[in-house]
Amino acid sequence: MTKPVPTSPSTIGNSTDPDLGRRLEHSHNGVAHSLPSVSQSLVELYRETPPVLAPDGTQVGPFPAGLTPADGVTLYRWLLLGRVFDEKAVHLQRQGRMGTYPPLVGQEAAQAGSAYALHPEDWLIPSYRDHLAARMRGLSFRYTLMYWMGIEEGNRIPDDVQVFTTAVSIGDQLPHATGAALATQLLHEKRAFIVYFGDGATSEGDFHESLNFAGVYRLPLVYFCQNNQYAISTPRTRQTASATIAQKAIAYGFPGERVDGNDVFAVYDAVHRALERARAGEGPTLVEAVTYRLGPHTTADDPSRYRSKDEEEIWAKQRDPLLRLRRFLQSQNLWTDEDEERARAEAVAEVQQEIAAAEAAVQEAKRHPEQIFDHTFAKLPLYLQRQRQEFLTVTRGDNGQS
Amino acid sequence: MAAVTGEEGRGVAVSTPHRTSKNGSTNGSASLNLNLVEAINQALHLAMERDSRVVVMGEDVGRNGGVFRATDGLWQRFGPERVIDTPLAESVIVGAAVGMAAFGLRPVAEIQFEGFTYLAFDQLVTQAARLRNRSRGRFRVPLVLRAPHGGGVRAPEHHSEAPEALYAHVPGLQVVIPSNPCDAKGLLLAALQQDDPVIFFEPKRIYRAFRQSVPQEAYTVPIGAAAVVREGHDVTVVSWGASVHSVLDVIAKHGVDDNNSTDHAASADGIGHLDVDAVSHLDVELIDLRSLKPWDEETVLHSVEKTGRLVVVQEAWQTGGFGSEIISRVAQKALYSLQAPPVLVGGWDIPVPLAQLEREQLPSSVRIRAALAQVMQG
Ligand SMILES: Cc1ncc(C[n+]2csc(CCOP(=O)(O)OP(=O)(O)O)c2C)c(N)n1
Ligand SMILES: [Mg+2]
């Protein structure tokens, strides 16, 4: 048996090698059973982002290109805003002023670091827990609140906000992102897409089919997985036998990069480079941000049924993304306790204003329930006009009772 | 125990109250006071004890006991090999269950919400439903697919659907939907005796709405047999799942001995030309279909021949819903018994609204009363 000849790794690594498959097929040279080895090029598709901040906030690596410590202040304000919003939203649910709500607590750095890397022309395609990332793209919290309070207007993203609708059916948004990126490619537009999803979503067929498709067309798309260790009660280790989620990209022929999702600068670094690749026409990247869902899956979930308090404590006390960044900023004399107080007060004020706006929107929607018919089609067909009429004449007399 | 049917079980009149109150009492040691989700849990316990081929699988069904706790305690009792926490992959859950069923097991696959059965649609329609036929009987699919069904609990988007007609349309699938704890247990145990796939929908709005005295031992409620919840002579109302209770609410509120004046004011307002007052004195025959495929034509036809009037109440979308199937069959088989055109009360043909306006989609009292008034006019 001939020893396999390693392929030169030179063309592979930073970018995918579109010719790999062709070279493999044509490199037999008539020698039976002789395949050139591709192991090196496969290995090079997998990367781990160098850390910037250690969990205790000390700097352990260089800042990503284009970022300075001062960006840390801006980012910290975002992280804090995300946390304050989350606290208030959970509280609203507990008071009965909102329906089931999926908290983001613990995942602030993953969301902020990634959203911070987007350019104005880029698009964000979220899942259902990405309230902070969407806010950073310009989606006011009132929309997020309206959606979880239970009116469709929460999904009516303003025209000047480059955020797609909330995706609740797990994995459904990945093929949409694939198609959106394909549209941009076919229309010769210069922009990238980023699609958010969880560790659990990587088990769905839509995940695999979408990555495969994007790999084939080298689409301008970043797959951003927030691996928060759980899909409701199912731990990551029961979701996949792969050592990492990032490595799954290798199977589809493009890079996968694993990053500490609670190191906001490292997340920015990984996503920034992936977006640059996408905009440069070099194809998709899968970024796995390793983080932790500090709260319940949703306000209807009880995590004590499937994970230990000790485990939660470790992540809450030793790996909190806010604490990490705050310690760093304080060590650089970039953040004081007064700054903290002021930033928190500003965040609270914003969230309170958004809650008031959302609750007003809910009241408004309830004043016009017949609008449930109005967006089913571009033009209401006759049978729906009739149903709408029946609704108005019969059901509206039922107000307040059933 | 009346909901538990013996002799063929067809359209057996239910003599005990269909719905016992929260403090309804248990009948000595032989029965337990259970709500619907507990009755399902108990049926699963019994089935797994009696037949080692029964395995439960799905997302969060093991350690967590299911998001509605329907599988609570099974993992602890039967272990992770028979109560399988799966990856998040509906198509594989159902597809794997088809394979497991073909190779000697009796899988009970849980899909966390009915709205996520669509991700397994291909495996259900293309495979589960027809493997027996395709293999000329060599391979069987004794698979039970359980999923919570319907709206009314203010759940998030895609969590409040009523897709039963989609599945009832498919040759090779059986579709069942209980409306009370006794039926839930008996129908689930019956489904587990089937050699062909059963879609078992559980109305989540009434998972915990009320308790019933449920016999402790195993029993079955035959698939394909309706229950006459209440006998009457004026009009036949056919319903299933949680909507049965929407009809019962109307009957209870507007029975001969109970006239709710506030409700009358509101409804008279809306219905206008219809004589809603007359509705309060109607002697309604209420049929709970319990199984949609196969469905109990004889019981419905027999009732319509007696009353001459038919109203069908469903939560599902109107166009192509199962109510249309019932009305079509009645038109084909009992047209000359009808004294008025049948009336369908169903969800509007729109995506189920989010929580704030979701109730507008459910069959409300006022719409049921309006339908009764309309059918009595003819
Ligand atoms: C197709 C589908 N199946 C099941 C569910 C129910 N469900 C909602 S979230 C969730 C877990 C998702 O886990 P993951 O992808 O890791 O995201 P996370 O919630 O951790 O952010 C499940 C099973 C759903 N929404 N959609
Ligand atoms: Mg997760």
Image (spheres, rainbow, N blue to C red):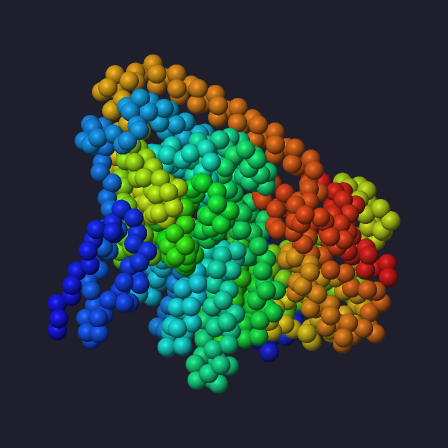
Q: Quadrant of residue A335?
A: top left
Between residues B208 and B343, which one lies in front from this camera angle?
A: B343
> x%, y% of residue B261?
78, 42
Locate residue B175: give its quadrant.
Answer: bottom right
Q: Residue at x 28, y 31 (%)?
A: A65
Q: How many marks?
A: 0
Q: Tell me what residue is drawn at x 59 percent, y 64 percent.
A: B166
Q: Nearer the viewer, residue B163 or A173?
A: A173
Q: Is residue A92 visible?
A: no
Quadrant for residue B203, please give it: bottom right
Compare residues A13 and A61 and report the one nearer the observer. A13
Residue A287 coordinates in the image, percent (x, y): 32, 45
Please give the name of the residue rendered at 25% of the width and 29% of the height, measured from the top-left corner. A63
Residue at the top extreme of this rendering: A338
Q: Position of residue A249 (x, y in %)?
A: 32, 53
**In the depicted view, which residue is nearer to us: A341 or B58?**
A341
Query: Does residue A84 lie above or below A249 as drawn?
Result: above
User: Left or right: B212 with respect to B62?
Assistant: right
A62 lies left or right of B156: left
The quarter of the image holding the N terminus of chain A is: bottom left
Asked if A202 appears above or below A268 in the picture, the reply is below
Please say whether residue B141 is visible from this viewpoint: yes
Is B260 left, or right, of A113 in this rendering? Answer: right
Give the x, y percent position of residue A289: 31, 42
Residue at the far front: name it: A29
Residue for point 70% across, 65% down? B324
